Image: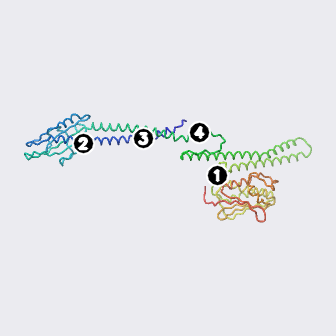
Amino acid sequence: MKRRSLRMQVSIWLLGPLLALLALDACLTYQRAMDAANAAFDRTLGFSLKSIREGIRLRNGDIEVDLPYLSLDMFESNTGGKIYYVVRDESGRAITGYADLPLPAKRLAEPYQTRFYNSTFRGQPLRMAALRLPVHDVPNAQTRVVQVMVGETPDAREALAREILSGSLLQEGLLVVLALGIVRLGVERGLLPLRRLSAKVAARSDDDPTPLDKEGLPCEVAPLVESINQYIGRTQRMLISRRRFFADAAHQLKTPLAVIQAESELAMRDDAPAPAGTRECRDVHLRRLNRAVRQAARIVQQLMSLSRFDADSGHAVQLVVVPLHAIARDAALDWSPVARSRGIDLGFEQAARVDVVGQAHLLTELVGNLIDNAIRYAGDASVITVRVASHDTRPVLEVIDDGPGIAADEREAVFERFYRSSATQTVEGSGLGLSIVREIVRVHDARISLLDAPGGGLIARVTFPPAKRER
């Protein structure tokens, strides 16, 4: 698919409105030009009336018209249009000129007042000027009134208006071309920072995590660079998380896989004909093999959970209001067979209905990991209680055991991946359970603390924010 040029798009976007404005301006310019031409030529018509007026006399009661030379010369020299005139007496009879020249729609009342109007004469439009003029014969003490009218075809006016319009259009067309050129040049210069930015991005190596430099970039481009830097940061953190996951998986699965290989080879060797007791040896190897497989499967499951919950993995978690008491009760019921197999008393206490903002399956995994750790490290025949309550409108989840607990100086370290205290080296585990708990707690904006239980043991307490909104 051919990519469109930003310069071409801007030019096209500007050209349409500019042409529309040019057409509108042409109409307005032509109207102004016609108004100016009418004003100029109306003054000429008024001058013609005054010239004719100078040649009108009243002698012995008869009206005589003697057109001055200047008026005749103006009529004959008019180019691009025709001029018509008529002089009428008070009865409307034509004394001289074109007798069929149209009268004004309204009767001329005031003398010496020139009236301009538009009319039609012999199928063509005319611009008319009319004047009512008293003529005096002083010796005989007589006065008569005449009407003087002069008409002109609009050819000369329109020609002048078109000339003004063509000059204006030529000038404005040149301005449009110059404006497009300036805009194109401006866009070209405005795109230079983006070109430099593109060159910087293209020149970067694949493993370069440094953010792009915003120095010297326009403020309009800065948000784009900031978004790119955020994307680079997220991608880098995601890659680090993936590399850490594979490194952790390789480290933690190395031992179980070695055990699986060794025990399977020993079991196959014992499968050959041998003295009595061979079956018992094979069963021992198979049990060890099964234990190693279960340990590897659990490690993989926990590593996958950490990868999903990791703050740098890029996964977004949608939280809604869920019943914490129901989730904790169901988790306790799920783990009760495991607790009974080791003679552990696993109980559940609920003070009231408690809701939290979270994800049900993540909270189920959180409670399950806390119960699993308590079962593993509290020891056989211990007592474990899962309690849900609300303290000052904040939901609280507690898993309490009466086991040996955790030393105060190790309570922060146990949340690190693969950390195993010296007191728990003999207990089967991977050191990932509390790491998963910490990540789930972080996702829910909650807090986890490890406290001494009354009478000995450990309290794992998770305090959630009030469930006032969904997000």
Q: Label 2: which residue? A: 43
Mark 4 closeness class: few <14, some 14–19, many ≥20 residues within 10 Å: few
Who comes first in sequence, dot 2 or dot 4?
A: 2
Number of other residues with Cα within 10 Å of mark 3, as a class: few under 14, some 14 to 19, many 20 or more:
some
Residue with the mark numbered 4: 199
First in residue order: circle 2 vs circle 1: 2
Q: Position of residue 242 (x, y in %)?
A: 69, 45
Q: Of the residues shown, which amino acid type is indicated by label 3?
A: Leu
Q: Which of marks 3 and 1 is nearer the N terminus?
A: 3
Q: Nearer the viewer, mark 2 or mark 1?
A: 2
In front: label 1 or label 4? 4
Percent from the top left, x then y, of residue 267? 85, 43
Name which residue type carries label 1.
Answer: Val
Check whether the beta carbons of the residues at disc 3 and disc 1 lie within 8 A of each other: no
Q: Name the residue under label 1.
A: 317
Q: How far apart are marks 4 and 3 (CA)?
A: 35 Å
Q: What residue type is labelled 2?
A: Arg
Q: Are marks 2 and 1 in contact (CB under 8 Å)?
A: no
Q: Distance between the residues labelled 3 and 1?
A: 51 Å
Q: In this view, does 130 lie to the left or right of 322?
A: left
Q: Distance between the residues labelled 3 and 2?
A: 37 Å
The amino acid sitting under disc 4 is Ala
Callout 1 touching callout 4 (CB < 8 Å): no
Judged from the image, the secondary structure of the residue bearing numbered disc 4 is helix
Tell me, for residue 18, which label it has, or none: 3
